[in-house]
Amino acid sequence: MNRVAASRRLFHVALLIGVCGFAALLFNTWILAAAAIPLAGLLLLAFVEVVLPIPARGERKTELGDQLLWGDETQIEVKLERAWLPLNLQLEEAMPEGLALVPNSQTGFQVLPGGDAVAQYRVRVQRRGDQRFGVARLKRISALGLLERAAPLAIPTRVTVLPPSARNLGVRVRPRPPQRSGRTTRAARRGPGDDFYALREYMPGDSIGDVNWKATARLNRVITNEFLPDEPPRYLLYVDTRGAGAEFGQGDVFERALHLASILAEALLEARAHVGIVLLSFHSVFLVPGGGANQLRRIRQMIIDAQPGQEASIHELVLAGVAHLPARADAILITPNVYDASLGAAVGFLQARHGRCTILAPAFPEPAGDELGTIADRASGALLNAEQATALAGLHRLADSALQWPPDEPIAITLGRLGMAGRAR
């Protein structure tokens, strides 16, 4: 109820009390006067209720802590300190963009021992990144809704929404063996690898099984084979973060590209591969391949902080982003914008530098549920997906594989079509 409605209701009540009192004096009867007294008491009670102090201090905490996962649903609790008559308090939250209130999940304030009060509601996580709550609004409304008063409630709260998890989605991949072509990037040493590197003289500690008997007989001294050490598979994820999908009213495709990068990076790292990432935008940022939990944390933080960048040719961005990256790695280009005229040149460059290049294109999701959009919007999304599939068919000749990730297809199936899916967990 707004303040205007409350003022009107108060005026009506005051008018009724005045009429009753005037009639009681005019007709010298106590019946109408007795009817006016309870009305005056209710008005006084409403005034007392609404002038009680509104709490200015409190705390907000989530059921899952300060780190949430995209797609989660969690409960949030708002606790007030020393709240007088908390049953007539109402909370109006300032929700961040990445959290959506679950309908009919908010409860009123309940009294706790010690004079505190608590209210709860549930939210659904729908966008990755750092989410900050705004200043909430706390209203005190009298029992009959006659009067109301509001005050701001500042509870600084920040939660970090992580991108989707490969482990939670049951995604498991099977990395391809590393390439041995090209110049090695580090000095060779003895190891259990299978690739021959060079011949050298026998040294104490060498295995007798590594002796090259033909070379030993020919040179009349003991010669051993030296092999390249085993190396983990290396992957470089080139992620198109130019936000081209926003031009078509399809901002979600930018998020889907980042989700795909996060899922694939985590799954590859769990398979003991080394993974690096390049965010292609006007100012490209990159992370050289590495393994382990710390590498996953760094990649996730880059994805959390990613924002749509300025438009530029993807070929130029690829050229600018690979200067300090190793050549011996499989390249995976994640881009929804397969209409870029320079994409063929970019794929050709990645093929020449890395030897392997795969294109993964998140499809443009169409509106669903209560947000179906106009017929023109739905037709535009269908046309974009058809054009994307046509463009990918042409790019398939340049890259090792070029696949589209439909919105309704689990990522494990897409990776299976790519030949990377491992066994189910």
Image: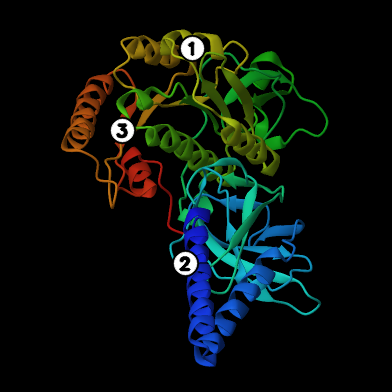
Q: Is residue 134 left or right of residue 79?
A: left
Specify whether residue 232 is in view.
no
- Residue at numbered disc 3: 403
Q: Residue at x 64, y 36 (%)?
A: 301
Q: First in sequence: mark 2 or mark 1?
A: 2
Residue 54 placement (x, y as % from top left): 72, 61
- Residue at numbered disc 2: 12
Q: Note whether 354 is above or below 54 in the view shown.
A: above
Residue 129 placement (x, y as % from top left): 58, 39
Q: Note whether 25 is above or below 233 in the view shown.
A: below
| Residue type highlighted by circle 1 | Leu
Callout 3: few (<14), some (14-19), or many (20+) C-alpha neighbours within 10 Å? many
| Circle nearer the viewer, 3 or 1 | 1
- Pointer 2 with pointer 1, Cβ within 8 A: no
Cα separation, mark 2 vs mark 3, equals 69 Å
Task: Tell me the SS state at disc 2.
Answer: helix
- Residue at numbered disc 1: 317
Q: Residue at x 79, y 68 (%)?
A: 82
| Residue type highlighted by circle 3 | Leu
Q: Note whether 291 is above or below 57 in the view shown.
A: above
Q: First in sequence: mark 2 or mark 3?
A: 2
